[in-house]
Image (cartoon, grey):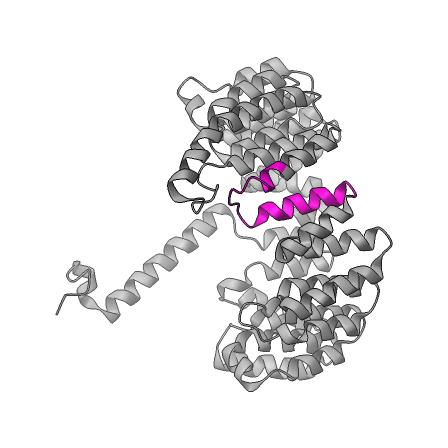
Amino acid sequence: MRTLLDLGQVELLIQAARERGDWNCAEAAARELCAAGEFDRALAVVDPFTDIGWRAAELVAAEIMIRRGEGDEALAMVRPDPAELGDGHVCASYAELLAKAGRVEEAVDVLTPHLGQYWLRSHLVEITEGQGRDDLVLDVLTREAERLEPIESAACRRCGGDCGTGRTGLWHVLLLISRVLERAGRTDEAVAVLRAERASGRRHPGNFPEYYAELLARQGLIDELGALAAEDHRSALDVYAKALEDAGRADEAETVLRDGIEAHDHPKDRAALMRLLVRQGRIDEAVETGRPTYEYYDCWNFLQWALELLVEDGRPGRALELLDARTDEYVKEHPDQVRSLRLWLLGEAGRCKEGIAEATALNEQEPGRWDTALARLLELDGRLEEALALLRSSTHDLVRHDLPDMLIRHGRPAEALDSIPTIAESRAAAERREREAAERREQDDPWSATGWFSVEPPF
């Protein structure tokens, strides 16, 4: 759906919504038509879904009506009843529509009873941005902070500060207050709020210092940011280095990161240095910087990133050398990852026939498992119809998205849409798989069908 939108295939989405009953296509088409000012057509697309009481469709229809200048009618159509006002999800959707209709005070009133939930506090800040009522939002958030402060203090007295603030969320409210102050242009106050909370001695989640560091960077308070980085390098060092770079002090930024790596050798610092080097076009140095992490158990994405950097730099052969340099132990522990990366790189290097031979051999060992990689190599080798035939015949679950993707890449969007099962077909296939799985379980363990020994007996 997103790809079809990017290609401007709105009429095809409308057709899919009408003929296939596909809500995703209907919503995308309606929003696109609405953005173009075609409100009547947009409503016509969602009407079949509102007719059956589909709540998501009613909300989209209300949004279209608001854009058409019919705010009162739209809000009346989706207004929650008293019981529904106790549901935070219902209130979030309704408050968003109220804000879009310019009724910010009502939106705030709807959300205020639910501000104990962190995601609804964030939602309040998001839907009121640019509405000119930051003073009202600050007042509500300040009252919430005042409500949480004594709870927080009592908790800290009981446990000596070891409980953290994630339990009650005062830190989150203060972050939001700072964010609203900043967008209102009251930047000194925004910094002061987080500065005071940082100095309070309360424990915070790991991302709190990052928010504070990013605020300092946006306000150009580089010296204060440097002090924070010295105190908490893991949270603030990369932000400090980027701020130095943005201020035209790239050499200092590089020195800061290299010193951090020497002192702590944390993967996050290496990632920050890699990004800096890439921005300067120093790809080989970036790859070497990441090298010590390539076989860390929790940093496999560093290796893939390095390979992508080399491919983007036009050197897939060099990327293959880097992959082939992995230790036998690493390859043994990550066989599928290494094989997938190798097949991808063979394609990027133009060695398609070699890749096809390897993927075919792997498929013989694990039928269907390597259909995606094999189809891509066939496509790159100019054998498009063979690739499409392979994907059409594949029974592997992971392949179901590859056929429409390939068709779209080759300018065949209508075929791509037709290749996607309808909702009814998907449901029937899922039910068939469940029946087959149940039959296999019964064949493997006849007792399971009777319900006996549903748990392992103690003997």
Q: Position of residue 189 (x, y in %)?
A: 69, 30
Q: Which residue is pictured at 82% across the width and 55% down the height?
A: 245
Residue that sits furthest to the bottom in the current view: 328
In the image, 248: left or right of 454? right
Where's the C terminus, which quadrant? bottom left
- Vertical side of 136 occupied by 374: above or below: below
Q: Quadrant of residue 219?
A: top right
- Name of the residue lying farthest toward the right: 248
Q: Is residue 161 left or right of residue 238?
A: left
Question: Which sits in the foreground, 181 or 316?
Answer: 181
Asked if one can make out residue 116 in the rendered structure from this viewpoint, the answer is yes
Q: Magenta stretch: give its range.
A: 196-220
Instruction: Name, please, the residue furthest toward the left.
Output: 459
Q: For residue 435, which quarter of the picture?
A: bottom left
In the rendered structure, does residue 244 fall within the stretch colored magenta?
Answer: no
Q: In this rendering, is residue 59 above or below 207?
A: above
The x and y percentages for residue 389 are 60, 68
Quarter of the rendering containing residue 104: top right
Q: Residue at x 56, y 22 (%)?
A: 140
Number of numbered discs on residues = 0
From the image, give the main secondary structure of the stretch colored magenta: helix
Q: Is residue 53 visible?
A: no
Q: Is residue 210 magenta?
A: yes
Q: Position of residue 320 (x, y in %)?
A: 70, 80
Give the residue at x 67% y 84%: 354
In front of the other: 255 or 334: 255
**Which residue corresponds to the image point at 67% horizontal and 63% vertical from the top-left?**
269
Q: Position of residue 455 (x, y in %)?
A: 19, 61
